[in-house]
Amino acid sequence: MLFDRRTTGRNFVRLTTAVVFALAAGCWSGRVDASEFVLVRDGQPTATIVTAAAATDAAAFSAQELQYHVQKITGTVLPIKSDAEMVEGARILVGPSAAAAQLGVEPSQFKDQEYLIRFVDNTLILLGKDAPSCENVGKVKNWSTPTGGVRIAPPAMFEDQATSYAVHDFLERFCDVRWYGPGESETVFPKTATLVVQPREIRRAPVLGYRHPYGPMEIISEQWNHPSPQDIALFWARLRAGGEKYSCNHSFGGYYDRFWAKNPKSPEMFHPDWFAQGYPGQPPQMCYSNQGFIDQVVADARKFFDDQGAVAGAQAMGKYFGLVPMDTYLCWCKCPACQAQLEPRQNGPDDGIGYFSNGIASDYFFAFANRVAREVAKTHPDKYLSTLAYAEYAYYPRKVRLEPNISVQMCLHVRNWWAPGMEENDLRFYRDWVSHEKGRPLYVWLYYCFPEQTGAPPFHCFPGFSAHNLDRQIKMFARDGIRGAFLNNIGEQVDHYVTLKLFDDPSLDVNALLEEFFTRYYGPAAGPMQRLYLRIEEIFSNPVNYPEEVQKARNKHFHQTEEMAWKYLGTEARMAELGALMDEATRLAVGDVEKQRVALFRKAIWDYMVDGRKQYLARQQEKAR
């Protein structure tokens, strides 16, 4: 197994909280009782990790995580004991326990996702609001390791696990650990025989409450050297992905089996009138004005909330029931009642019809959502219907005003903002929702799948490096009170790392994040690797590098095409410039781990780009014959 270059030439390293990110948003400093806290001295353990005898799943996992990383830093294994055992010397209390309660710290004092790092009486407390393990006490999930061992698996992504947040924040801020990807070779940490930290109190929660990554796609999987699903789950736990139990997606696909396919044994379940009228064969949508269909959706929502924990998906959804049409376009019901609620397709300057995201069906769909929401509120006033602002119902409705028990998740093409018209359109409906719906739970759905997900016929895209755009977007979400974000796939290693760090704390400086990433990840090859990333980012993000139509068109939706990628972006001159940086980085990488990381970038990104341009030129030559 490969690890990063270690700090050398010293047998004593004093690690403090004054690392690159001195203080995250929302944390505060308090009283401490000592000038230093020693975990390991000269290769000998000076502290003991302590959990409750019946630890929460998050605490059991986090205790092992702390032990594992301290061992990697110092070569020393800190013992783990329960608070029912005698402990001499310094203690590290992980998770809720009687020992923490004796020092005045209990889970009831914390809000959702909030955690505490506190030093007092030769004791370090790492504790947050966790899910009670209930029947899982003593039966935490385990994973087999490639070497035949067993490790405790992280809690499910949306299980309350703020103790895990506390431990991983401590490892980052106080012990200088970084996770730049899943797997050991993507983990960076110092090497020292003595681990001493300077006490500081931190109490905070992640800024975006809902942080849901989904993926990965091929480019980043290649950069990460094809990690296992377990490696990815562990990486996301370390970067504090997860959070609020929220979900929203297309909701009515199951109605075809339930109510469209005629079943002789249950003829009362055949309801063709509930589906979109005017289409041959299986309809593409529901009839969102049909009272029988609406009554059934209300019944399903009530059952969902009544059966929390029993219905598949209920735990993940929490207090939200998804209410979203099928993922089809321009396929609404043609019955008179539905057609009367749709906006005329005039393709004028303000209706957005040329964009994928517009408002043709906003009043129509949200009128349906209101009818369901009013009925559900009568029996479940503390629950929500989760909806998207998507495709033809992306715009803020002109006439309908939403019931208070509806949440909205806006779908934004954030990696397509190289097209000025698309950025303007996204911001148009985003700002309308934000300005008109202060206090409503608002979320965003971010299309990180582009430009890699290029459609048919497939081609090698010009990489969509976007750290600085993503930085300004996530800072905007935080300022506007957006509750959280779903990542529709993962585009690239640096962007993914920056995104998850900013979801946790949008106040971080993106340039400092990038500088630290390249310096610590690539060592002597950091300079050309960082310049290579930034140059690709500038080429991809700048509208002037695209065809004139992209720069000037409005009311038109764009995705990267092969011609855009290799005629306009990856030109011969630019590829030569980028290739020189790639070769320089390869020459400068001296350690085994840095050579491996540069080689993975070359294979995943650079070779992919070279092949993409070759394929484009070959197709152009074929067309010319």
Image (tube, helix red, strand yellow):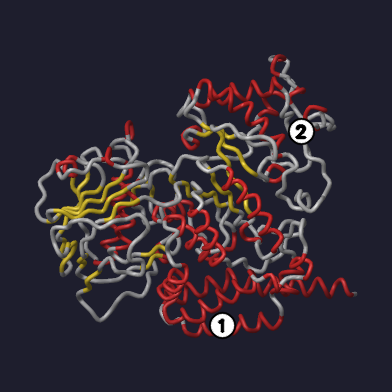
Q: What label sits on residue 452 in the rendered view?
A: none
Q: Position of residue 456 (x, y in %)?
A: 75, 57
Q: Position of residue 308 (x, y in %)?
A: 46, 28
Q: Position of residue 512 (x, y in %)?
A: 43, 71
The image shows residue 181, relative to residue 622, as above or below, that is above
Q: Amino acid at mark 1?
A: Leu
Distance between mark 2 and mark 1 Cα atoms:
56 Å
Q: Amino acid at mark 2?
A: Gln
For mark 1, give the secondary structure: helix
Q: Is residue 541 left or right of residue 243?
A: right
Q: Is residue 331 left or right of residue 418?
A: right
Residue at screen point 51% across, 76% down:
530
Q: Residues within 10 Å of mark 1 (few under 14, many from 20)?
A: many
Residue at screen point 47% across, 46% down:
210
Q: Quadrant of the C terminus?
A: bottom right
Q: Is residue 40 left or right of residue 207?
A: left
Instruction: Please tell me which residue lies in front, 319 or 196.
Output: 319
List the residue tagged with mark 2. Answer: 341
Of label 2 and label 1, which has the lower sequence position?
2
Image quadrant in which you'd find residue 369 = top right
Image quadrant in which you'd find residue 421 = bottom right
Q: Residues within 10 Å of mark 2 (few under 14, many from 20)?
A: some
Image quadrant in which you'd find residue 491 = bottom right
List the residue tagged with mark 1. Answer: 581
For mark 2, give the secondary structure: loop
The image shows residue 97, relative to residue 586, as above or below, that is above
Q: Is residue 289 left or right of residue 347?
A: left
Marks 2, 1: nearer the viewer: 2
